[in-house]
Image (spheres, grey):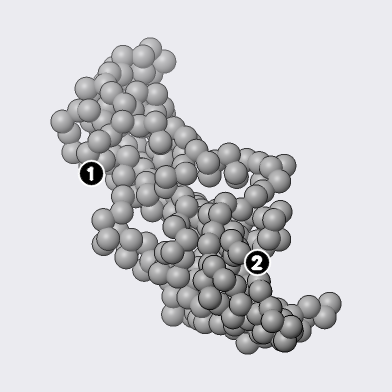
Amino acid sequence: LVKYMWAPATSAATLAVPSVVSILISSEFLQMGPLVEDCLRYIHLHINQIVKLPIDFGCINATLLHRLTEKFSVDELDDIKDQREKLVGRLYMKKLELFLENEEPRTLQQCCNCKRLYTQHAGPARCTEAKMTIDYHGAVVARHKPNPEWRVSRYILRLRSEGKSWREIYWHIWGLSHVMTCTVCGEKFSCAELGHCSYHPQALKTSGGNEGVYPCCGQSVLNFDVSNKSAAARQGCCARNHVVRAEGADAEILDTMLKRHSLVPIPFDDARRL
């Protein structure tokens, strides 16, 4: 610290893995702004060596953690080898906080009727429990209705209480917050529901009347019925992956999602348990 006061240009080069966290804390306390920045850059470059140190990273306050998190991309966070999550867990927690602050158009909501999670700018598929209405184009729609009592912060705390790591929670929320359109079923879906393109493996059988039955699951439907119950029955008893035209922004989202295929998707059977 004293050397830096006299020769800041040369002293920054003497930072070392065993002492850089201590220097960071001290320089922040002494309001030595340039040295704080040098330490943050050094930690960013040597993070996998630093997390192996037998030190308590809880001494890094919220302000420093915020600045350190901004230096890491999510790909870099995934590459950190911190088995005990001494620091990477806090970095993911802060990265999630920044994501929610900067993604206001994608703010998560819970539907009062079907209990599914959706974003403000695009809900996944139709609400299977909502009242049917007709839009300006004459199409039958059933819109999600936000639950005013639901809070994403409480949802995150619930996930933590279930033993989810901050990395798992970050990618779960990321998956729920990004929406694409399936080229097969035509529905909008969140990345977390990649494997929810539902279908019936056997074709509808009719006996000449208004009612038909799907042999694969025994579900009966009316041929001339646009109600939610009928629409839900037609969606299918089995599921496969949605198909996305990987162009533009969707291509980048799809690539990010596929890299975390074990973290982002929600199993088809768990879709209504959120």
From the viewer's side, name the closer residue of 201 and 267. 201
From the viewer's side, name the closer residue of 169 and 9. 169
Which amino acid does the dot numbered 1 rest on? Gly
Is the residue marked by circle 1 packed among few (<14), some (14-19), or many (20+) residues within 10 Å? Answer: few
Which residue is found at the position 58% from the left and 39% from the top?
Answer: 255
Which residue is found at the position 34% from the left and 50% from the top?
Answer: 166
Report the quarter where the C terminus lies. Answer: bottom left
**Disc ID at residue 203:** 2
Which residue is found at the position 26% from the left and 40% from the top?
Answer: 85
Q: Is residue 219 left or right of residue 30?
A: right
- Residue 33: x, y in percent? 40, 33
Q: Which residue is mark 1?
A: 58
> In the rendered view, would you say 146 is above or below 264?
below
- Residue 25: x, y in percent? 27, 35
Residue depth check, mark 1 versus mark 2: number of the one nearer the observer: 2
Q: Residue furthest front?
A: 207
Residue 105 visible to the viewer: no
Which residue is found at the position 42% from the left and 51% from the top?
Answer: 170
- Residue 22: x, y in percent? 23, 30
